Image: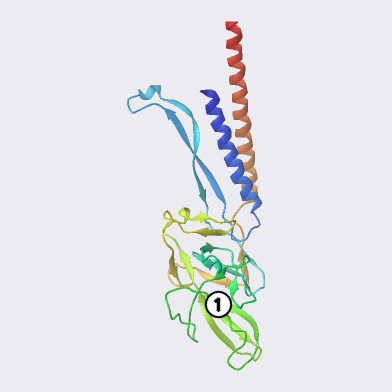
């Protein structure tokens, strides 16, 4: 039995090593959230077994959970770099598959078609607004940035306000609000399924997204010219790496010791 107990220990340590290594690898990934492995003990016995005779037979991976604590905000100077200060995820949608994803990585850009997208080309979802920036619908959608305004002046740039209003500026000095970036929150963020380094999709465990406007109630404010860094503390992860490595080595040593003991018993019989 000790062989299997230690073998499970090695597998658990390998899982821990993989998770810690992934955290370290993404320590510079904008919007990344660190993961932590939780373990639970395994015992042999039934409801009728004398509690004094129940024997531990190792441990198992109970869960791999993500820590959604806010990362530090770094100034970039780019108006299309946007960070969420507080609760909420940006909503992006693939123009090819229609898949909706949620992210804290606000490194946005404008594509050749005039849509605000993330680095993968997924379109940032916004509320349509009137000229004053008041949302005219409760549904998020793709928003096209006009290349020229009504006077025929060419697009010159874009700004994002704390409340999510996206304003396009034009060569004649005019500004036009083209939409309002919406934020999504979840009843159980731990239930989100990770898609890549800093994107998530909703699941039955997370519940459906609750959409709202930045600065409104539970939703955080937007900070243009900033990006949210990974919340990984490399020093903590390096300590975790050492602990996982030692657990791996200790379980390997336990297997070696059990092998030697078994061999000694076999030698006694011969």
Q: How is the image coloured?
A: rainbow
In this figure, which residue is indicated by the disc labeled 1?
A: 161
| Nearest the eye: 157 or 269 | 269
Q: Please state the horizontal and vertical placement of residue 47, each as a whole percent of the image.
A: 33, 28
Where is residue 129 shown, x and y percent of the image?
48, 82
Percent of width and height locating residue 270: 60, 5
Q: Is residue 247 left or right of residue 91?
A: right
Residue 163 seen by the camera: no
Q: Is residue 65 visible?
A: yes
Which residue is painted at 52% across and 58% down in the image?
200
Q: Is residue 50 left or right of 19 when viewed as pictured?
A: left
The spot of residue 103 in percent (x, y) is: 54, 63
Residue shown at the point (59%, 24%) measured from the top left:
255
Q: In percent of the image, x 55 and y 37: which residue is there? A: 12
Element at badge 1? loop
- Is residue 260 placed above or below 214 in the rendered structure? above
Q: Residue furthest front?
A: 96
- Where is 143 relative to 245, above or below? below
Instruction: In the displayed orientation, state which residue is furthest to the left.
Output: 48
Residue at 61 percent of width and 12 percent of height: 264
């Amino acid at each position: 039995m000790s062989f299997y107990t230690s073998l499970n220990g090695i597998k658990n340590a390998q899982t821990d090593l993989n998770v810690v290594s992934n955290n370290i690898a993404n320590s510079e990934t904008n919007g990344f959230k660190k993961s932590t492995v939780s373990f639970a003990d395994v015992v042999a016995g039934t409801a009728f077994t004398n509690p004094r005779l129940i024997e531990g037979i190792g441990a198992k991976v109970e869960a791999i959970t993500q820590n959604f604590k806010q990362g530090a905000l770094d100034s970039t100077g780019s108006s299309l770099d946007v960070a969420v200060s507080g609760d909420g995820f940006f909503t992006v949608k693939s123009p090819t598959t229609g898949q909706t994803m949620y992210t804290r990585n606000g490194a946005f850009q404008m594509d050749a078609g005039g849509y605000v997208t993330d680095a993968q080309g997924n379109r940032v979802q916004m509320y349509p607004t009137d000229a004053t920036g008041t949302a005219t619908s409760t549904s998020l959608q793709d928003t096209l940035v006009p290349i020229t305004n009504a006077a025929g002046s060419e697009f010159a740039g874009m700004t994002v306000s704390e409340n999510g209003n996206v304003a396009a500026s034009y060569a004649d000095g005019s500004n036009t609000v083209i939409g309002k970036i919406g934020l999504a929150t979840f009843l159980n963020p731990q239930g989100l399924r990770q898609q890549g380094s800093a994107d998530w999709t909703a699941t039955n465990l997370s519940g459906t997204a609750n959409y709202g406007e930045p600065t409104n109630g539970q939703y955080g404010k937007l900070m243009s010219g900033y990006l949210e860094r990974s919340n990984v503390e490399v020093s903590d992860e390096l300590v975790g790496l050492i602990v996982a490595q030692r657990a791996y080595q200790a379980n390997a040593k336990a297997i070696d010791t059990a092998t030697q003991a078994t061999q000694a018993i076999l030698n006694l019989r011969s």
